Amino acid sequence: MKNIITIGGSTSKKSINKVLAEYSGELLSNVELTKIDLNDYEMPLFSVDVEAENGFPKKAQELNNLIEGADGFIISLAEHNGAYSAAFKNAYDWLSRINGKVWRDKPMLLMATSPGARGGQTVLEIALGRFPYMGGNIIGSLSVPSFFDNFKEGELVDVDLKENLLKLVEDFDKAL
Ligand SMILES: Cc1cc2nc3c(=O)[nH]c(=O)nc-3n(C[C@H](O)[C@H](O)[C@H](O)COP(=O)(O)O)c2cc1C
């Protein structure tokens, strides 16, 4: 059985991106989901000096090991001031020091959502531009705008968005 990692790129306890990533993962059948909560992977703020003094944090190594063992990733990024959340970027910086090909060329479904009308499109574009240089094999991407209008009672209720997501999940499944 394939092992898929889901990540919400945020440490918010009520992260809508975590909800979206896990919801999307649950649309797949016959996979094992490893649902990552960045709160479980707290790391010191990246600095070349901290790295030189203490090496890689244990939590970064644990996360790297999970990535190494996974078959694919479903990631939904929170947008903070038009960029990655500090927690995601920090983990990403540490991971990139362990292995520059962070995502190991394994299939990825990349998303972003926000309560606003742009649906995290800015951070999504940043990641779409950058992840391919870091071993990202992006099978498809989706921004879900106005999360609280479009996602209700555990379900993506907008018909077009749901159709798009189902197609992406199908493509992702085929690529695994
Ligand atoms: C510091 C901060 C900056 C934010 N900047 C943006 C932004 O640039 N664009 C946006 O659409 N939403 C922005 N938001 C709102 C987030 O999209 C919203 O908090 C969302 O719930 C974050 O995703 P999460 O629930 O997965 O943490 C910001 C929120 C915070 C706390």
Image: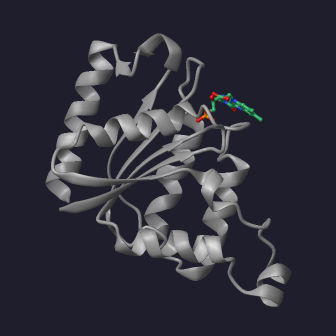
* 98 displayed left or right of 82: left
* 37 displayed left or right of 109: right
Q: Residue at x 69, y 60 (%)?
A: 42
* 30 displayed left or right of 32: left
* 53 displayed left or right of 68: right
Residue situated in front as seen by the camera: 170 or 133: 170
Q: Where is residue 135 in the image (x, y as percent from the top left)?
A: 42, 69
Above or below residue 33? Residue 97 is: below
Q: Residue at x 44, y 69 (%)?
A: 66
Above or below residue 57? Residue 119 is: above
Residue situated in front as seen by the camera: 154 or 47: 154
Rendered image quadrant of residue 28: top left
Above or below residue 63? Residue 33 is: above
Q: Where is residue 89 in the image (x, y as percent from the top left)?
A: 66, 57
Q: Is residue 66 visible?
A: yes
The residue sitting at the top extreme is: 149
> Ligand 1 is located in which of the four quadrants?
top right
Q: Which colour scheme is used?
A: one colour
Q: Residue at x 48, y 68 (%)?
A: 133
Q: Where is residue 68 in the image (x, y as percent from the top left)?
A: 40, 75
Q: Quadrant of the C terminus?
A: bottom left
Q: Is residue 146 visible?
A: no
Rendered image quadrant of residue 115: top right
Q: Where is residue 174 in the image (x, y as percent from the top left)?
A: 14, 53
Q: Quadrant of the N terminus?
A: bottom left
Q: Residue at x 32, y 22 (%)?
A: 161
Q: How many labels does the image show?
A: 0
Residue situated in front as seen by the camera: 88 or 63: 63
